[in-house]
Every structure is written in structure tokens, then in C-alpha cells.
Image (tube, helix red, strand yellow):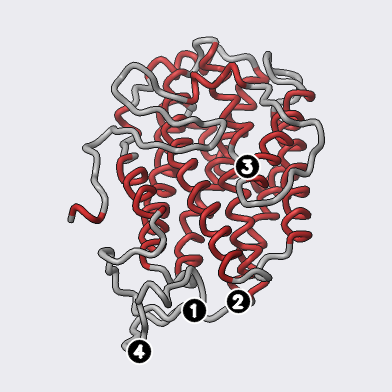
Amino acid sequence: MDRKRLFNPEGNDSLLERRIIKGNSTNLFNLNNVKFTWATQLYRTMMANFWIPEKVDLTQDKNDYENLTVPEREAYDGILSFLIFLDSIQTNNVPNISDYVTAPEVNLLLSIQTFQEAIHSQSYQYIIESILPKESRDLIYDKWRDDKILFERNRFIAQIYQDFIEETSDRNFAKVLVANYLLESLYFYNGFNFFYLLASRNKMVGTSDVIRLINRDELSHVVLFQKIIREIKAENPNFFQEEEIRMMFQTAVEQEILWTEHIIGNRVLGITTETTEAYTKWLANERLRTIGLAPMYDGFTKNPYKHLERFADTEGDGNVKSNFFEGTVTSYNMSSSIDGWDEF
């Protein structure tokens, strides 16, 4: 893989020559000529998702936190620690991916994703500062170092990212894209469900509202990397190795189940060993399907947390729904909607 040139007078931005990777881009954002038309709609969705965490009132959550059971509080803290690490590493790594993408309409989406990941990190800071006792805040940020299971699953993704930085081969870039897709499409969701489960019992409702806004953004990132992977497969049929993708999915599923068992287990009402396995394997099957691969886990065809769907969505306040569990993204507004590039 060659990093694209920043200044490239000999570049060719014609639609016929434009490619997701390995193109010859000038890096000019000529958005009047777009090859990957799906990027226009996704741009509208991502831009319409602008939000500010401080607009969510967490006053009641501070009282709720003090009344959580010990297992609920431990899960709350641990999942926050995990999410903080994920979004921190994404904020730093997405620009590194963009350096090798040669379609300007896709580069623009990756820039928006980077901004959104930074907002997510700031959102976790807002939650921690508003809810957690001062003496325990640093423990949340340092938990990934001290918890062996959390460290190992963080290392799985982070090491793939680091390997590409140290050796920018085609194979390592392919693995980076799959790792990013796994992070965005599989790693968050048992944690999200925990917060929605609390909200279903009228606990930590403000936190659930922030998580819901974050998960709206993440769904657009899932779609973005679904599209990137599928387009690269069309351009370069041998760029991805299916066996390697499946091995990465298997590791991710095993680690997601192990982590969820470790931090939640059977200690929180509504989450069991059986539902964790069923949900994670069902979701993995769905994520494989949307990048054009057959499911890995026979018999896992149903979502055991379907009843939480209403807590993962916003109804009755003028927002447009997005189906969190099926991964079909539509826009909603916390700001003025922005039309597509054709309106500029």
C-alpha cells in the first residue's frame, strides 16, 4: 500500500479512474462529480446527526448510580472504560485509514467520523464527571491496563492498527479495515444493551440517552465500512482473504462473549450467559451477511434483546427513526438538516 500524495498535479479524478484505494487522486474535493453515490446519502445522515452531550440532563443519573446494585455499578464502570478506549483509538486511527483512500467523497465521510469519535470521547468524560465520584474517575480510564480480559481484547484491535502503521502492506490494510468494521459493528453492542436494559427499569436514563446518540453515529460508521469493504472487493477481488476475515470474526465474537460474561455475567437481571451468546453470534451473522459473506453460526437467527429496541431509538420528538438492531440507518435531527452536495 502506498500512501496517497498530498500534492499530486498528475492525479486523475475522473469517475472512470476513481477508486476507493490505489487510485490516482489529486485530493481535490470535487463533489459535483461523485462516483460512489451512496456516499451522498450517508453524508446527509452523518451531518444531520450533530449533537452536544451537555444537552442531555444527567442530574437524576447521579442519584440512580448511588442506588445501583454492586454488579450493575461494576458493569457500568467497566463498560464505560471499554467504550472510552474504543473511541479514543478510533479518533486516532481513522485519519490513518483515510491517508490511503483515494475517493474524495469517502475521505469526507471519514473526516466526519473522526469528528464524531472525538465527540463520543468527550461524551464519556461528561458522563464520568457528572455521575462518578471524583476518587473513582481515574480508575475508569486506567481499567484497560489493570483488567487482563479487557486488556487482551483491546490489544487484539489495537495491535492490528499498529501493525499497519509499522508495515503498510496490502494484507495489513485489509486487516485494518476488517478490524475497524468489527469494532464499529460488533464490539459496542452488548455494552449498549446493558445501558438500555437499565433504562427499561428507569435507571440511568440520561446515560442511555447519550449512548443512544452515540449508537446512531456508530451505525453510520458500520454502513460506511460495509460500503468500503464491498467496493474494495469489487475493485480488487483478491484483496481480502475470506478465511482471515472469518478468523478475525471468530476471535472478536469469543472476546466479546468472554468480556460480557466477565463484566456482567449472570449478575444483572435481564442478561444471561445464554442471551449474551445468542445476541453476539446473531449479530456476527448479520454483520457477515452485509459484507457479502455467509453466516458462521448455525441456529443463531434471532435477536434475544428485541424488546429493548424502543430504548435504542427515539420516538415522538420529531426525530426520524433508525433501526439500531437491523443496522439500517436514516437521519435524525438535533440540528438543522443539511442537504446533499448537489444543493451547494
Whichever of labels 4 and 3 marks the residue nearer the N terminus, that label is 4
- Disc 1 to disc 2: CB gap under 8 Å: yes
Q: Give how far across and how far down residue 51 sits, in percent.
A: 32, 37
User: Marks 3/1: CA distance?
Assistant: 28 Å
- Mark 1 surroundings: few (<14), some (14-19) or many (≥20) residues within 10 A: some
Q: Give how far across and how far down residue 91 sits, in percent.
A: 46, 55
Location of mark 3 (residue): 187
Location of mark 2 (residue): 168
User: Marks 1/4: CA distance?
Assistant: 15 Å
Location of mark 4 (residue): 10
Q: Nearer the viewer, mark 2 or mark 4?
A: 4
The disc at residue 3 is 1
What is the three-letter code of the residue carrying label 2? Thr
Q: Secondary structure at mark 2?
A: loop
Q: Give how far across and how far down residue 264 sits, in percent.
A: 70, 26
Q: Nearer the viewer, residue 236 or 133?
A: 236
Residue farthest to the bottom?
10
- Disc 2 to disc 4: CB gap under 8 Å: no
- Mark 3 surroundings: few (<14), some (14-19) or many (≥20) residues within 10 A: many
Q: Quadrant of the C terminus?
A: bottom left
